[in-house]
Image (spheres, rainbow, N blue to C red):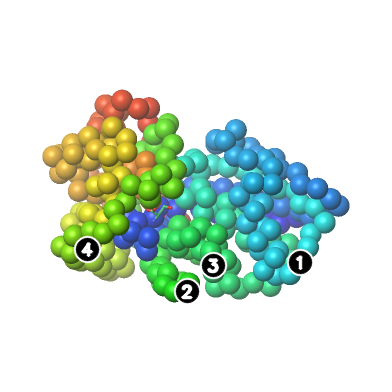
Amino acid sequence: MIRVKVPATTANIGPGFDCLGIALSLYNEIEVEEIDNGLIIDIEGRDEEKIEKNENNLVYQSMLKTFQRIGYQPKGIKIKQYNRIPIARGLGSSAACIVGGVMAANGLCGKPLSTEEMLELAVEIEGHPDNVTPALVGGVVVSCKDEGQTTYIRFDVHEALKFIVAIPEVELSTKASRGVLPETIAFQDAVMNVGKSSLLVAALMSGELEKLSFALKDRLHQPYRIKLMDSLENIFTRGEDLGLNQLFLSGAGPSIIYLTWGEEAEKEKKFYHIIKEAPEEWTFQVLAGDN
Ligand code: HSE
């Protein structure tokens, strides 16, 4: 039996659309074994009723693609998923299933694929690298996909960073959330994002955390996506009015993260307050980075 543990991830981190991601201290676990025939899938945990238990299951699909890549044909497969990452909330639940499936299948075959080969396959399945890369290697990851090739640099998440994650009951699919993005954007918006994203990476690497509050603004995706849910626009507008500059949409949303490094109790209280006033039902999880 092979057991893998895969972290949740938050992608984009404000301005780093499709290239920045951080692994978080929230994990799915998957156990797989080869059986004599057929497919058995058992799921336990958060959103278990929403996860497919048939051939469409994403862990299973990712395992099949990995077996194909390796050239192995299993007789049958048994999968047990312990799910803790909420589905379709912008916390990398799909990436965790994909990476979990690829790692598990690779493990069953005696680990013939390297991390780079597993990454290539995971990016092919997910389409963009910013969730699957930190799900596979942990930490903060800058990943860039160009002409079918993905290159990344990984470094540790600063231990002082605290991710206050607000998760709404309502789901939002990445497909729907990518569907509202514009075909083109204004040159000055691109320039702003390049500057903020570069500053963000430098601040995370150097530990100059006080620079983060200036770095997290985005003009490529958040302005379009927050219009998808009534409360999102309101939360971001109120947050801006109250000087909560470290707010960003996690991945494609709808979860929101307030990024802090302690000694910001008053601002944290304001964040909780704004979210509690929103019409939808939200829950909070305070997470650290996963290294
Ligand atoms: N970068 C992706 C997006 C992350 O924003 O659409 C979601 O999977």
Point out residue 268 in the picture as x, y percentages from the top left corner: 25, 39
> Marks 3/2: CA distance?
10 Å
Alpha carbon distance from label 1 to label 3: 19 Å
**To which residue does mark 4 refer?**
190
Q: CA distance from mark 2 to mark 4?
A: 23 Å
- Mark 1: which secondary structure? loop
**Residue under the image location 69 percent in, 47 percent down:** 55
Which residue has dot 3 on it?
119
Q: Which residue is mark 2?
A: 149
- Mark 4 neighbour class, 10 Å CA radius: few under 14, some 14 to 19, many 20 or more: some
| Quadrant in which residue 147 is drawn | bottom left
Question: In the rendered structure, which amino acid carries the disc numbered 3?
Answer: Leu
- Up the image or down, 146 lies above or below 244; here it is below
Q: Is residue 237 above or below residue 179?
A: above
Closer to the eye: label 3 or 4: 4
Q: Mark 2 or mark 4: name the one nearer the start of the chain.
A: 2
